[in-house]
Image (cartoon, rainbow, N blue to C red):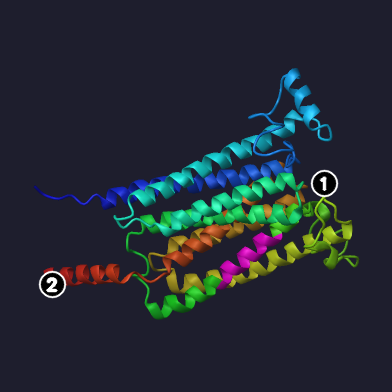
Amino acid sequence: MQHTDITPQIRRRMARWSLFASLLAVVVIMLGAWTRLVDAGLGCPDWPGCYGFLSVPQSEQHIAIANSRFPETPVEVAKGWPEMIHRYAAGTLGLVVFGLAGFAVRHRQKAIPLRLPLCIAGFVVLQAAFGMWTVTLKLWPQVVALHLLGGFTTLSLLVLLTLRLRRSGAAGQSVAPEVTGPLRRWVWAGLILVILQIALGAWTAANYAAVACPELPTCQGEWWPAGMDFRHGFDVLQQVGPNYLGGQLTADGRVAIHMSHRVGAVLVAGYFMFLLYLLWRHLGRTAHARPVLLLGGVLAAQLALGLANVYWQFPLAVAVAHNAMGAALLLAVINVLWRLQPLPATATAKATSVTTTNEVTA
């Protein structure tokens, strides 16, 4: 009786669920942006329910009960639903991630990644805690910014898991190591810049500083506003206690944050134009050309969405898309970096064996 190796089937099944979790994570990030942009971050003043209910109270009786429980925050159904829809989606993502971790533990003897799924599951627990603190600490900017970064981190880890499960052994074969080594260092620097820019974007969103400069290319009629207060704008020791819905910073502090995000965007754009030239010069005729083109397209789309946000005065759809495209830019950089990783020794030996066999056959 011939033995059949089921490991490839198990890896493919886990890869499909990991890809589904990655797509769901994108949806959660977009729903989080939508919730924040419609000022519904405190649409439900408690966690994980809403005014003590599993869904937004809507009947007169339930609304009366909810208002008696939280007299300082009367029910606003239109703001409660964005918050709860976001929580439902995040909860579903958590269940899928725990399922992936359980699947990895069950099949740990079949060359299935174990530490990464367990790491993601642990991080999702931490992310849920930040979701709770976002509400209980009344949108304290430090927690809100970390919660936003946590969402991007969760997505990145899920995509890395998907890439690892789907790896076919093609990465790195068409480019010499002496080329990929220096290129990886340039891409790593680009990844760090993107992460810093996303962090600036998270701080901008957490402090409601996006609308501080409502025109382009100047800000409030000046190229570099004289009254900007960077110490106030980047005060990470803001006290816990007040309701931060709408923000507590002065206008000068918000302008400082907004301008920092703009300068960061210019630096990222300039660096990536050089990086794309460098990548295309060495990879344009290889199997890695498509990831490089994808990175260039995502960068162009993100810059266009950032400009459109200001030009059209931050319409909801464009603002949500800007958040989603920020995640796409991060993933595009990670994808290029992954493609430039050297092959494992076993895969390299297999590729060499296949090449030698083909040459002998020829």
- Disc 1 residue type (three-letter): Asn
Residue identified by numbered label 2: 360
Is residue 319 left or right of 2 when viewed as pictured?
right
Kind of residue indicated by mark 2: Val
Considering depth in this image, is 262 or 248 the residue closer to the camera? 248
**268, above or below 246, in the image:** below
What is the number of the mark on residue 342? none
Residue 355: percent from the left, percent from the top? Answer: 21, 70
- The residue depicted at 67 percent of the width and 36 percent of the height is 82
Closer to viewer: mark 2 or mark 1: 1
Please tell me whether mark 1 sits on a helix, a strand or a loop. loop
Nearest the viewer among 74 and 149 is: 74
User: Which residue is identified by label 1?
Assistant: 243
Residue 195 highlighted magenta (yes or no): yes
**Residue at image x 73%, y 39%?**
40
Residue at left offset 84%, top offset 67%: 231
Mark 1 residue crowding within 10 angstroms, few (<14) / some (14–19) / many (20+) = some
261 relative position to 88: left or right: right
Residue 186, position as x, y percentages in the image: 53, 74
The residue furthest left is 1
Locate residue 170, reporting x and y percent.
33, 64
Residue in the foreground of this view, choosing between 16 and 103: 103
Q: Is residue 257 visible in this depiction of the protein?
A: yes
Residue 85 or residue 323, whichever sits in front:
85
Residue 217, visible in the rendered structure: no
Chain part drawn in magenta: 189-200
